[in-house]
Image (cartoon, helix red, strand yellow):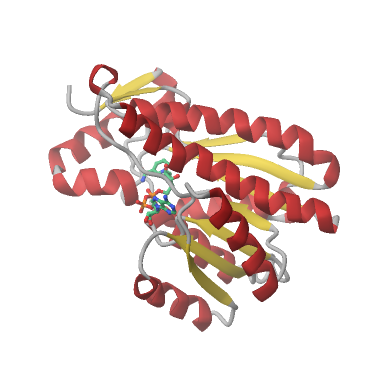
Amino acid sequence: MPESLKGQVGIISGGLGDIGRAVALEFARRGADVAIGDVLDEKDARPTLRRIKTLRRNCRYDRVDVRDADAVYRWVRDVEADLGLPTLIVPNAAVVHLTNVRELTPEVWRDELSVNLDGAFYLAQAATQRLLKKKKPGRVVFIGSWAGHAVHKHIPTYCVSKAGLRMLCQCLAAELAPHGICVNELAPGYVDAGLSGRFFKADPELKRQSRARVPNQQLIDPDEVARQVAYLCEPEARHYVGATLVMDGGLSLFGSGGWKE
Ligand SMILES: NC(=O)c1ccc[n+]([C@@H]2O[C@H](COP(=O)([O-])OP(=O)(O)OC[C@H]3O[C@@H](n4cnc5c(N)ncnc54)[C@H](O)[C@@H]3O)[C@@H](O)[C@H]2O)c1
């Protein structure tokens, strides 16, 4: 698929995380220029920017907290002024806290929803408003989770945030499809990196149990997620509108899962 996204500009929140970085590199491999936002320090972005430049693509890093709507709107305008109008929009930033509903504090509830759901809304709205203004087509791929489709014990706010994201995806998709903007969701299962990868590293037995719970007995690699995100941005994916691609090895088929009984 050489250069199939050439002439496009990707914008990815949480783009220094394991999945976000893989998406940025996959976009660059397919010919797109890439804007990465994250809360991490500029120096943490350097290796990724170097790899993108090696692929002969333009790129930039901005320190952006997606909980701050104004900062997200400024980021989108800055990217447009520098790299061009963002056409491949990936709200990806997320956090997760281990708790149960009984012990969940209002602070954790609010913080997790504000990153995972509010932040995704701000980026999707800011970037698609610019597409509408310029009358340009584009793609939005929300990074959801199987845990938005089935109960995952001990991460209740995460489940709620990802379930909300799914409906946001559908509402936005219905509004924007007539304008040539396709909005979809990719919902991975257990990825052996990023949020769950950190739990797995700290507790190898949890990793073994988690893999055993997946019907196809496999954990997912971030590059596999990135290729599916890029696929949803390809011209041939134009009939996906408000769809969710659940890539979870069958995990959500059983309706419920969880860590640490
Ligand atoms: N790892 C998994 O098993 C898994 C499974 C399904 C879905 N996902 C989803 O994939 C996406 C990426 O997660 P990941 O696993 O790569 O985790 P990760 O922790 O590696 O990446 C998340 C990134 O978001 C950034 N971030 C956190 N708060 C932010 C904020 N307020 N503003 C901007 N950036 C912020 C972090 O600094 C980090 O770089 C998330 O939406 C997550 O829910 C992950």
Q: Residue pushed farthest front?
A: 70
Relative to 154, residue 238 above or below: below
Q: Nearer the viewer, residue 103 or 106?
A: 106
- Say whether residue 199 is left or right of residue 72: left
Q: Nearer the viewer, residue 249 or 10?
A: 10
| Residue 1 visible within the image | no
Rendered image quadrant of residue 206: top left
Residue at 40%, 71% in the rendered image: 45
- Say whether residue 256 is left or right of residue 13: left
Rendered image quadrant of residue 217: top left
Relative to 170, residue 115 above or below: below
Relative to 52, residue 211 above or below: above
Residue at 25%, 33% in the rendered image: 98
Q: Quadrant of the N terminus?
A: bottom right
Image position, residue 89 (x, y; %) = 62, 54
Image position, residue 140 (x, y; %) = 65, 48
Residue at 57%, 70% in the rendered image: 28
Residue at 68%, 62% in the rendered image: 86
| Residue 133 visible within the image | yes
Image position, residue 83 (x, y; %) = 66, 73
| Number of numbered discs on residues | 0
